[in-house]
Amino acid sequence: MNFYALFAQLLELVIALLLAPLLTGWVNQCRAWFQNRSAPPLLQTYFTLHKLFHKDALLAHNASSLFRAAPYIIFSCMALASAIVPTLSTDLIFSPAADAIALVGLFALARIFIALAGMDVGTAFGSLGARREMLIGFLAEPALLMVIFTTSLISQSTSLSTIVETLAHREFVIYPSLAFAGVAFTMVSLAENARVPVDNPTTHLELTMLHEAMILEYSSRHLALIEWAACLKLFAYSCLGIALFFPFGIPEAADPASLAVAGAILVFKLLIGGFLLALIETINAKMRIFRAPEFLGTAFLLAVLAMLVHLLLEVGP
Amino acid sequence: MSPTLNLAVPFSSQLINLFAAIMLLLGFAMLAQRRIITLINLFTLQGAVLSLSTLVVALTTHQTHLLWSAGLTFTLKVALLPWILHRLIRKLSVKWDVETLINIPTTMLVGIGLVVIAFNVAQPISQLSGTITRATLGIALACVLLAFLMMITRSKAVPQVIGFLAMENGLFFAATSATYGMPMVVELGIALDVLVGMVILGVFFFQIREQFDSLDIRQMERIKEE
């Protein structure tokens, strides 16, 4: 048993759980600034979670046990996902399991359960939201896989730790294919995290909802877990983006000092990432739902192009 | 695990490859774009990337005439032509309408097919070339084909002209990547041709609109002698 790896792993999990609501708060704050509104406090997400955890849970009469179990499953999927993306160190206990395809599978598992829970109570909006979520999901998933395959072609492995090691610690090489993959990844993560061009997370109009429509029936601690899981998903996607495209600063050496430096660098990158996300959300308008397949189709094509460009330019004669 | 694939490639060549990839990305963005203003901005950006990559080739291979052509590209494609285009659409007041003959996802799929063909066709040719930029020949060819596709699928006159100009971008890039650019005289000639062509097409736009009350060139298929 490697104690350093265990320590790094636990630290990463704790940091993910704590930083994820903060990241969401930061994005909301930036968005408010851009839109000339007075910003909510940075810790607003914590306050909301705290409030929700202290309320009494209400369940619909015809809710099955799946409805009650789903928030816990979704939350643990997302917590595990943020734990296996290497952010602080590439030497983690879960490193052998941190396969990119497994990560996509984790996201898919969470999506299945949230969709089932949305349909479980049998309200119209729940089913509508679930169907829309699956539409987005089945288009976003292949695009995400193609992006990951491009980075795997570069590093010859689907293990996230190996990918990060290859990109961050070898001699610096510009990979043009990563430019394409980066654009595709941004599009996919916007769609997967229910962000503005595809879905508006702050909407109150049920007919336009995607993600929110599925969780309308939830209250109290169940809702809190789902909200927290959504924050974790955003955090996991941000960290995945950082790991695949800007892994510089994730240390190789196994000592606690480098962990602290890596933490500082991670926070800095997340601040910039959140700022850019808020910028994208502000300058774009929400698309009609039927534009979403075109949006995600474009993401898929860009990811395919990334692979083609890699084969043409980077596998030299 | 095998080592990284292209450690032997020098940094300038990597930079050129990156620019080539961005050119292709912009080509696709233009293909998918619905608004004319954004289309012109993308074209400007492509011109800027093209002149940057020419500059890098010039600096690494010490070819002075490429420096000139980088400057020429910059003045023409980043400053002059976008300015003319912006003025034209302001005068014609066509800011929003880009109509495509086949829908955009299908166009993108065809575009991917074209890229695959271009890469395959360019492979044996680039083996013969000895320049540091030879790998980008496939991308240059793909840019030309994509711009050509854009000309075919757009029904309005202004996007077609932008497609034409983008095709010239691709050709220029192909010339740089295959043989370090054409002789200066040829380049000057092409630049002048493009400029004059642009002016003439600008006059054409007004004529077309005067005759048909629209810039949709499908109207021109119905011209008959009375």
Image (spheres, coloured by chain):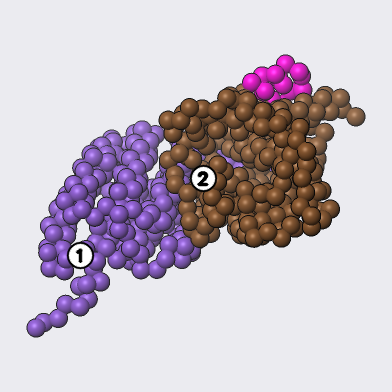
Q: Nearer the viewer, residue B110 or B61?
A: B110
| Residue labelled with disc 2 | A196
Q: Which one is closest to the eye, mark 1 or mark 2?
A: 2
Q: Is residue B199 shown left or right of residue A1?
A: left
Using the image, name the chain to which the residue with label 2 belongs. A
Above/below status of B97 relative to A43? below
| Residue labelled with disc 1 | B214
Residue at the extreme right: A1
**What's the magenta bit mostly, secondary-structure-wise?**
helix
Above/below status of A317 relative to B6? below
Based on the displayed image, in which of its 4 quarters is residue A95 positioned? top right
Q: Which chain is brown?
A: A
Query: Residue at the location (46% across, 30% down)?
Result: A37
Q: Tell me the magenta residue range.
A: A251-264
In the rendered structure, which amino acid carries the disc numbered 1?
Ser
Query: Residue at the location (74% across, 54% down)?
Result: A117
Does the magenta portion include B50?
A: no
Q: Is residue A157 shown left or right of residue A175?
A: right
Q: Nearer the viewer, residue A146 or A174?
A: A146
Using the image, name the chain to which the residue with label 1 belongs. B
